[in-house]
Image (tube, rainbow, N blue to C red):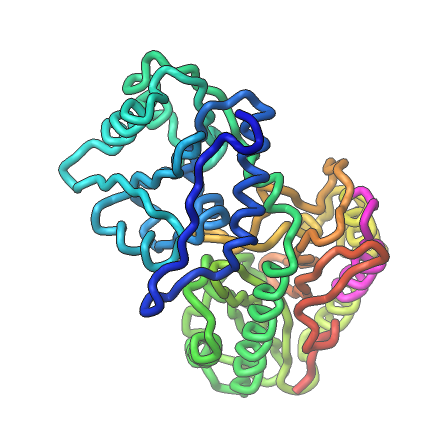
Amino acid sequence: MTKTDYAVTMQVPKKEYCGLAFSLPEYRRRYDLVMGAMRARGLDALLLRCPENICYLTGHETSGTYTYQVLVLSQDEPLLVIRWIEEPNAFEYSWLKRTVTVKDHEQPLEKMAAALAKMGLADKRIGLELSTMYVTHAEYEGTRQVLPKATLADASGLVEEFRMIKSEEELTIMREAARIVEKGVQAGMDAVAPGVSENHIAAEVHRVIVGEGGEFMSLPPYILAGPRTRLSHGTWRGGRVAQGEHVYFEVSACKHRYSSAIMRSICPGEPKNPILRPLAKAVNAGLEAGLAKVRAGVVAEDVDTAVRSTIAKEGFGDIRFGDHHKHRAAYSIGINFPPDWGEGQIISIRQGEKRKLQANMTFHMVPDVRIWPIIGYGCSTTFRVTDNGYEELTKAFPHELIIK
């Protein structure tokens, strides 16, 4: 393929539809980058199964990602092979004009193979996303069987390489998601009082986030009271707020499938557990140390070390692995579908990550300490890397334990 020998027609959905999240030039920029990467790898076609990658390129979204959908890229017009009942979503949200539908009694791989044969691609070099959770071993073997003459190549990470760096249009939406999640967490904090249940607090968070324009989240809000803060990824379960016991929030808001997230804790009255204040001091200092290290050109691992060593100096873990600080310092965040609001599989700020930070990467920095079975505390922020430092997207709350 040369730069101009592929066909693509981008159309704006009808006015009565939800429409595109981004401008057509933005989608065209992304499409051209991916087509150029395909050309560099010698691919005649690319089969995209990752829903984030499909949405990134086309705008198509659905919560029905548990069924087969694949975006076929080649010199021809792009084609979405999708479950029949899901086809209207492509017309509602994306610029795509070509689909092949799969009825529930039909075999998806056979429909995909027939479409590729019609496009003259069944015996070509075809890229697959082998590292995505959506391509199982059984699906890979099935693809080999229905495309016996094709040369199948692993194209994992081809699209993700471009997703790492956010455009200004993407950043605008992430800032909007940040404002929404801040309002949701504030509503949850306002609801905190002795005797109030975690469920009631979670309901307030949901009410405000949805009311402010937030869409379905890729993970639930994590809202825990008192000793239940010892749990990682624990959700509301009817626990009651007690005087002097903190409530932990880790919440995201999603807009056009882009998320910003934040952790904060609030305590009604002076903390009863004497470990909470020093624990909060250590974690908050870890967040500040990590942010102070951030700028374009810094090795990701070095930022993780700054967070980890700061928490270790306060007595809550050793510099490399951490006795109680068990989490990477940060993970990429941006476009997402369940079961995760992050993009940590693309890049994380962790030990062993030697890649350098680049301007307009976005991360959720998550210093977090859990002391089983006693207590836990986290304080986080979503930020954008800049040439000289960072832009904090979730900036409504100070980096501290909030006393109410």
Tell me: residue 340, above or below residue 397. above
Left or right of 143? Residue 377 is right
Q: Residue at x 33, y 63 (%)?
A: 14
Q: Which residues are magenta?
A: 283-299
Q: Residue at x 64, y 71 (%)?
A: 264
Tell me: residue 154, above or below residue 95. above
Does the magenta stretch mainly form a helix, a strand or a loop? helix
Viewer-nearest residue: 160 or 133: 160
Left or right of 126? Residue 262 is right
Q: Position of residue 33 (x, y in %)?
A: 59, 39
Q: Residue at x 59, y 75 (%)?
A: 179
Does 106 appear in magenta? Answer: no
Q: Position of residue 372 (x, y in %)?
A: 60, 57
The image quarter in which residue 373 lies: bottom right
Could you tell me if residue 314 is visible in this image? Answer: no
Q: Residue at x 81, y 46 (%)?
A: 319
The image quarter in which residue 315 lies: bottom right
Q: Position of residue 183 (x, y in %)?
A: 56, 79
Please state, as top left, top right, bottom left or bottom right, where the C terminus lies in the image: bottom right
Tell me: residue 62, above or below residue 103. below
Viewer-nearest residue: 67 or 168: 168
Left or right of 280? Residue 166 is left
Viewer-nearest residue: 32 or 382: 32
Could you tell me if residue 105 is visible in this image? Answer: yes
Q: Position of residue 284 (x, y in %)?
A: 76, 66
Left or right of 188? Residue 288 is right
